[in-house]
Each structure stands twice: as C-alpha cells, then as structure tokens.
Amino acid sequence: MIKRTLLSLLASFAFAAPAAATNPYAEMVRLEVLPGWHQANGTHIAALRITLAPGWKTYWRAPGDAGIPPSIRWAGSRNLTNATPQWPTPVVFSQNGMRSVGYKHELILPLVLTPQNVGKPITLKGQLQIGICNDICVPADLSFDLSLPQGATRPDPAIASALASQPFSGDKAGLSAVHCAVSPTADGLLLSADITLPSAGAEEYAVVETADPQVWVAEAETSRTGNRLHVETQLMHVEGGAFALDRSGIRITVLGTRHAVDIQGCPAAP
C-alpha cells in the first residue's frame, strides 16, 4: 500500500511538471534576492524572498505527502563554495484530506554563503524549483541572478527576523532525551521515537527526515503522554529493497502552536 501511494505521487508529479518557459502560473509567485550583509567570519548572509499571490502557498524542505519538495540549483554562481538555507518555522495545513507543511503569503529564506575567496564578491545565480498551491498544485521554476555587495555589514531586519523564526534547538527547548527503535516491515522500516520534551503547544505535529534523499518518509503519527512525545513513521527506499539507516542523520521537527523544535540525531535506547 505504501509503495503504491509513493509511486502514484511520483507519477503525478512527473506528469504535472511543465517547462519553466511555459509555466502559466509564474505570475502567482515572485522571487527576488535580498543582498544581505557580510559577516566578520568571512561568510555572507543573504536571502531568497518568495512572494505569493493571495490564496497561494508554497512548501517547506519536507513538505509532506501532499506537497512538492523545493530544490535550489546554484549553477552559474561565482565565488561560492557553499550555500546553506536556514528554514524559518513553517505551518501545517490540510489539502484534499492530507496534511502538508509550508508557508502562505511570503517566505524569506535566509542563506549562509561561504565564498571561495574571502574579500571578493559573490554572485548568486541559479534556479529555484518550488511547488505552489491554490485550488491545484503546480511546480514553478524561478531564476535568480545578483552580485552581492562586499561592504555591507548592517543586518537586514527582514532576514534577521526570518533567522529568529527558525525552530529552537533541542537544548533550548528543554529536550532531555530522544531514542529511536527501528524494526523491519514488508516495505522498509518502522521507526518509533520516544522524546522527552516539554510541550510545544496544544497541537503538535512531528516531521521526520533522514540524511538520504532516496529514503521516503511517511507522515508521522504523533502522541503525547505528560512530558514524553511518541512519534512513529514508516521509511521506504524509493527504489524498493533494503537500505541502511544512519541514525545520526535522522531529523525530527516538532511543530507546535507555541513554537517548533529541531531535534537532530536519534540513537537507540541504552
């Protein structure tokens, strides 16, 4: 059943993806680069600002079964060694009876940029592929190209606000312990996580990710008893068959009505 659902979703995405040049929904979303500022350690903080037309939304890095995962290509950038997105806390919304995770109205996505040569300008050039949704969901392929200023050192308030809205780390949120049990299933693996953590709000929704992009993760079931949160999900390799699971690469994000918590790594119980 899980395999059929996954293959159906992949097939529908493949047939729904038009070329960027013929995308009739491009007017529903605008993209611009916020140039940001240079930091004393040599890195540069910039951001991609995605502005959505009224009623439209886009997706987080782990969008859920009903969403389209975003992708950034940096081809054409100059003097750039690494670019790390810093995702603000998303919201959970329902779509055709399924839950997905993302943003409405606007997304400012901060980027931590590492230059090849400190002191020389960085040029950001590439493509952002995102899903946008209203009554229907479609992919949009958006290009960006901007040379970043070298002398700017004053933080941009919009980018700083987006950085501040990221999920708390486990330590800051009061995480006491996290352990994962893994057992085989007919399609892959069943992962059960027990997390000792104060509540993030009346309604909590957990998203599980792995370090391997070829591993599909089902929507997690989340329940709480006192200070303990239980999260359970199923994992399957997109090509089927057995696969190795790196516990250090497991990432669990708890989204609550008060705040969100980013938990990285999930060792076995002692």
Image (spheres, rainbow, N blue to C red):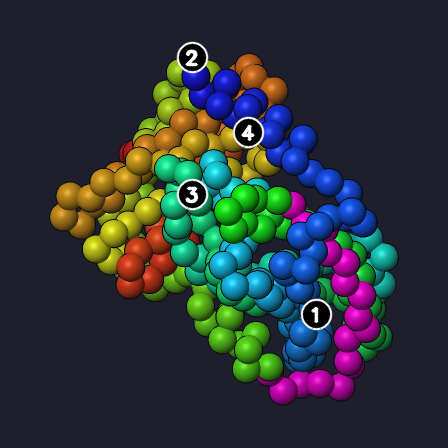
Q: CA distance from mark 4 to mark 2?
A: 20 Å
Q: Is residue 110 left or right of residue 113?
A: left
For the point 78% across and 81% down, the residue is: 150
Please tell me how crowded label 1 is: few (under 14), some (14-19), or many (20+) other residues with Cα within 10 Å.
many
Q: Is residue 249 left or right of residue 148?
A: left
Residue 68 is situated, as x and y percent measured from the top left of the image, at: 57, 42
For the point 33% across and 47% down, the residue is: 205
Q: Which residue has dot 2 on it?
A: 186
Q: CA distance from mark 1 to mark 3?
A: 29 Å
Q: CA distance from mark 3 to mark 4?
A: 14 Å
Q: Are marks 4 and 2 in contact (CB under 8 Å)?
A: no
Q: Which residue has dot 4 on it?
A: 9
Which callout, 1 or 3, points to the residue nearer the camera?
A: 3
Return the disc, 1 or 3, that comes first in the chain's sequence. 1
Return the disc, 4 or 1, that comes first in the chain's sequence. 4
Return the disc, 2 or 1, that comes first in the chain's sequence. 1
Question: Which amino acid type corresponds to the residue marked 2 in the rendered image?
Answer: Ala
Return the disc, 3 or 4, that comes first in the chain's sequence. 4
Question: What is the magenta range?
Answer: 139-155
Q: CA distance from mark 3 to mark 2?
A: 28 Å
